Amino acid sequence: MPFVKKEKYKQTELKHCRFLNLPELDFINWCSESYKINKGVFHTVDQWFYNYGIESIITRRLFLIAFFDYAAENVETKNKSNVIKFGRGGLNKKLHDFNLYIDLATVIQ
């Protein structure tokens, strides 16, 4: 997963990336174009991370990108047009799998 490889990114580089500091609508549109997700999926994932205890917008955006990278890697979730599809109950399952994959509880402490 490109986001998690520490040797590829420095923490200061990510924190100051232009797209992380975009206004809300522009960031949603950037995610929609980059990951082929709809706004409903974006808001659901954003809310899930917020409810999990990630209150900082920049930190949440980093987790959003990491999650969408993770979901995009799974061939089963893409259709012919590379749109990420989760199906009924699939988004919650994918969030749970992502949580286990990165051990979110230890990351946000």
Image: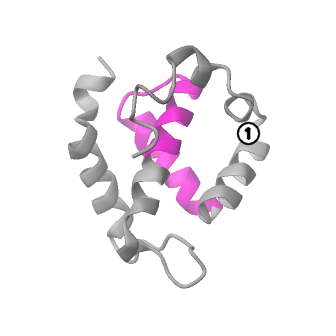
Q: Residue furthest bottom?
A: 80
Q: In this view, does 10 lie to the left or right of 70?
A: right
Q: Does the magenta stretch include residue 105?
A: no
| Residue at 23 percent of width and 24 percent of height | 106
Indicate the quadrant where residue 86 lies.
bottom left
Question: What is the total number of numbered labels drawn onto the structure image?
Answer: 1
Render colour scheme: one colour
In-image side of 50 versus 39 (left or right)? left
Image spot of residue 75 (x, y percent): 39, 72
Q: Is residue 48 magenta?
A: yes
Secondary element under disc 1, as helix, strand or loop, is helix
- Which residue lies at the image location 72% right of the left edge and 28% below the top edge? 21
Q: What stretch is highlighted in magenta?
A: 39-66
Residue positioned 50% across, 53% down in the render: 44
Amino acid beneath label 1? Glu
* Residue in view at x 43 percent, y 27 percent: 54
Q: Main secondary structure of the magenta part?
A: helix
**Relative to residue 33, is residue 95 drawn left or right?**
left
* Label 1 environment density (alpha carbons within 10 Å; few <14, some 14–19, many ≥20): few
Give percent across and percent down for residue 68: 49, 53
The percent coordinates of residue 6 (x first, y second) are 40, 26
Is 78 drawn above or below residue 49 in the view shown?
Answer: below
Q: Position of residue 5 (x, y in %)?
A: 39, 33
| Towards the viewer: 99 or 92 | 99
Q: Mark 1 points at which residue?
A: 24
